[in-house]
Structure formats: C-alpha cells, structure tokens
Amino acid sequence: MSFDHVNEEEMNDESCCSTEGSHRKSHHSDKVKSNLVTRLNRIEGQIRGIKGLIEKDTYCDDVITQISATQSALNSVAKILLEGHLKTCVIERIQEGDHEVLDEVLVTIHKLMKK
C-alpha cells in the first residue's frame, strides 16, 4: 500500500537509513525527495496564506478550514516518510538484529497519533 501517488518502487529506490558515526541518515531517491520537497513548498505557501488571512481579519471558520487542510498535507508527508522508513530502515535494522528499532517506531507512531 502506498500513500499519495508515491509507489512502492519509488519508496524502495535507494530509500534507506544508514548510520554514519553516531548519526543516522536517510537516503531517499531523488524522485521521493523531490516529491517531499514539492509538498513541503506547497505547505509553506499554505502557512503564508493562513498568516495573510489572519492579517486581513478573515472569518475564523475560513482560517480554521485552511489550517485543517495544511495539517492534512503535513500528515501526508509524515505518512510517506513513515512508509519508507518501515519498508527500508526498520526492516534493515531488524535483519541486523536491532530490535530496539521497534520501540523507536512505536514512539514515533504515538507522536503522530497524538495530533
């Protein structure tokens, strides 16, 4: 199952986490990275738009509707990242015997669900 037009092939194409020193890094394919950056640029524009609505004293319900749309867009970005993380980084770490990654993922999912 893939989210928001990012297919499984794109997710698995060079999309993995690696450990360099004590820091972990994610390595997404150029296609996935471009998709995420495009989405984030759009979200950034939505945030500026919300700010403008507030500055123009726009009706509160209209502003709240725009905030909701922006939150949904951010959730879509998180879902794409989480899917790629589960399909690559988490599987790889489990195969290496690192089962602590499951606790890490559960904490992350808990954070996402609180919103």
Image (cartoon, helix red, strand yellow):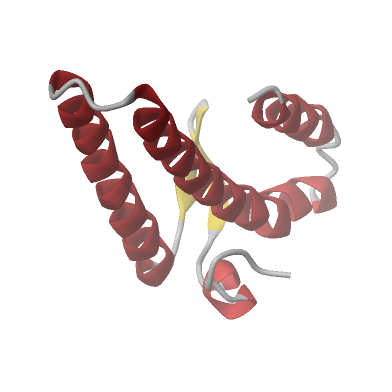
Does residue 88 appear to the left or right of 5 in the view shown? right
Q: How many marks?
A: 0
Which residue is nearer to you in this view: 58 or 111?
58
Q: Where does the image place residue 71, in percent across and percent down from the top left?
A: 48, 37
Image quadrant holding the N terminus, namely bottom right
Q: Residue at x 45, y 59 (%)?
A: 28
Does residue 45 appear to the left or right of 107 in the view shown? left
Does residue 25 appear to the left or right of 112 in the view shown? left
Does residue 60 appear to the left or right of 71 in the view shown? left
Give above or below for 82 relative to 71.
Answer: below
Q: Where does the image place residue 41, in percent across and percent down from the top left?
A: 25, 49
Which residue is nearer to you in this view: 95 or 26?
26
Give above or below for 17 relative to 55.
Answer: below
In the rendered image, which quarter is residue 80 located in?
Answer: bottom right
Which residue is nearer to you in this view: 94 or 83?
83
Q: Residue at x 63, y 75 (%)?
A: 8
In the rendered image, which quarter is residue 49 located in?
Answer: top left
Q: Where does the image place residue 15, in percent across and percent down from the top left?
A: 53, 61
Q: Residue at x 72, y 30 (%)?
A: 113
Q: Where does the image place residue 38, in percent across and percent down from the top left?
A: 29, 58
Image quadrant holding the C terminus, namely top right
Q: Residue at x 28, y 42 (%)?
A: 46
Give above or below for 48 relative to 5.
Answer: above
In the rendered image, which quarter is residue 43 located in?
Answer: top left
